[in-house]
Image (cartoon, helix red, strand yellow):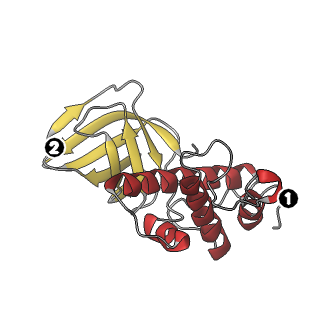
Amino acid sequence: MAYTKYVTDAVGVSGVCTLTIDNGDLADYYVGDKVRVDGINNNFNGIHTLTAVDQTLLTVTFSKGNVTETLNDLRGAEIEVIPQWTDSTAVIEWLGIAVASANDTAFIDDCVLASNEWCYRRRQAAGYTKDRTTFSPSGDVTLAATMYAATLYRERGAVDGFASFETMAAGGVPSMSLGRIMQLLGVNRAQIA
């Protein structure tokens, strides 16, 4: 995923965690961004919301419990911003269902995460390099991310496409929404400046 940075040092003081980034810049990191931290230890790893970004010192800060620990010269530790263009509430509304179990809720959350990251990567590949991860660039992109997450949820347990009770489906294959999703994302066509 884009916006992945390597972490060199991690400092936690009374639950305020500060990570130092290895080289580069933090131009694409903002206060309020959700980030995934991995490769440090359980005190720092996980998904967090940034509370401070210092471009000069190349540090980001978040809160976690009562962590008090200092780690230097980390190898393989990284932080990446998580796109947030749709959410579980929007997907449940689009599906028009009430979730039946905790497993359904967890799977919808997985579909939302996958959709947000896939949609973000597709737009980056199509040349929309100024998209922010925290905010969807437009309503049609939000709808595309919601539709894709709902489509992933509906495909649960299916071999090809989403499950359907329709006995007279065209050629026995359910119709897919991928063309519409790609259109809403503005990908697979020339970029309009």
Residue 17, how many percent across, how many down?
Answer: 25, 47
* Residue name at image x 60 percent, y 62 percent: 145
Classed neighbour count for the residue bearing mark 1: other residues with Cα under 10 Å, few (<14), some (14–19), many (≥20) = few
Question: Closer to the camera, 62 or 36?
Answer: 36
Query: SS for tag 1?
Result: loop
Q: Is residue 101 above or below residue 138?
A: above
Query: SS for tag 2?
Result: loop
Q: Is residue 39 above or below residue 63?
A: above
Q: CA distance from mark 1 to mark 2?
A: 48 Å
Residue 99 quadrant: bottom left
Residue 4, how many percent across, how many down?
Answer: 51, 41
Decide if residue 89 is on the left or right side of residue 40.
right
Quarter of the figure with the C terminus: bottom right
First of labels 1, 2 by sequence position? 2
Observer-side mark, 1 or 2, equals 1
Decide if residue 154 is on the left or right side of residue 144.
left
Residues marked 1 and 2 touching at CB (< 8 Å): no
Residue 189's tag is: 1
Going by the numbered disc 2, the residue's amino acid type is Val
Going by the numbered disc 1, the residue's amino acid type is Arg
Residue 67's tag is: 2
Residue 84, how many percent across, how many down?
Answer: 49, 61
Q: Residue furthest right?
A: 190
